[in-house]
Image: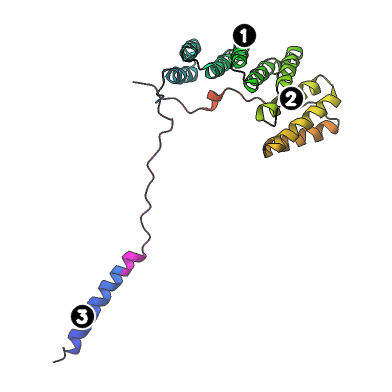
Amino acid sequence: MKPPIKTSLIYFGILALVLAMGMSVWLLPKPIQKEEEQPITPPIDAKDEAGRYIQKASENFFYHEFDEAIKNYKKAIEVYEKEGEIKKAAKVFESIGDMYKFRRNLKEAEKHYILAMENHRKNQDSLGEARAMNLAGDLYMERKIFSPAGAWYKKGLELVKNDPPHLIKALVLENMGHYLWKTENIPEAIVHFTQARDTFSALNNQMGYEHMGAVLNKLRGGQSHGHQIPDEGLKFHTSPTPKRKT
């Protein structure tokens, strides 16, 4: 016996409703999963002793505890020297030099850049030594004390002039170009800026290549050295605020 038409319509209606509800659930966009919020600053989680001293120094710097920062950098150097990590120790000497540079203590800044150079030399790291010389040159160039700036850039360039393309080489060439431009040796400045441009090009460093192209256009157009000397600055200047240990 067939069910009454009214009953069939009710069953059909229920079935349609269930299917519609199922389809609606399936068609609704899935809820967006909220990504776990990342801390604003990375945790202080260095596993090695020297690394922890360096992190403390970075924190000290942020809170303008400069003397404490220098002490922690020196503790890190002591650890690296005991472990025979001369290359890492050399980089920390550079950081101390940056610290004194920030405090406008040229004598101590240069002293620690020289210590960095000596450690790079022990490690037979000519690129590292050239980088420290470049930093020493910047120390004077930014204060318009041109003679020692040029001397340091020249020493750095002598170390890497025959090396394959490298960012440090490009930066020393660029800074030597700025020194020569500032001291009005335009032909030599053009030579060094051109070499810097070609080095950036070999490294596929588009920003450096374009910047050198713009400098060369300005220089060949007879314009004065009106733009500021590039300043890499201290790495920890742009670091997020370190968390204080409680």
Does residue 179 lie above or below 218 as drawn?
A: above
Q: Quadrant of the N terminus?
A: bottom left
* Helix, strand or loop at mark 3: helix
Q: Nearer the viewer, mark 2 or mark 3?
A: 2
Q: Nearer the viewer, mark 1 or mark 2?
A: 2
Amino acid found under the numbered disc labelled 3:
Tyr
The verdict on residue 135 being magenta is no
Residues under labels 1 and 2: Cα distance? 25 Å
| Label 1 vs 3, first from the N-terminus | 3
| Label 2 vs 3, first from the N-terminus | 3
Q: Residue 216, how many percent across, how many down?
A: 80, 33
Whether residue 14 can be seen here? yes
- CA neighbours of label 2 inside 10 A, class few (<14), some (14 to 19), many (20+): some
User: Residue under circle 3?
Assistant: 11
Tell me the magenta residue range: 23-43
- The residue positioned farthest toward the bottom in the image shown: 1
Q: Which mark is residue 111?
A: 1
* Helix, strand or loop at mark 1: helix
Residue 111, picture quadrant = top right
User: Residue under circle 2?
Assistant: 161
Amino acid found under the numbered disc labelled 2:
Lys
- Residue at the image position 77 percent from the left and 25 percent from the top: 177
- Residue at the image position 42 percent from the left and 19 percent from the top: 52
Q: Is residue 19 left or right of residue 144?
A: left
Residues under labels 2 and 3: Cα distance? 88 Å
Q: Residue 104, how many percent across, how many down?
A: 62, 12
Q: Residue 200, how many percent across, how many down?
A: 70, 35
The verdict on residue 25 being magenta is yes
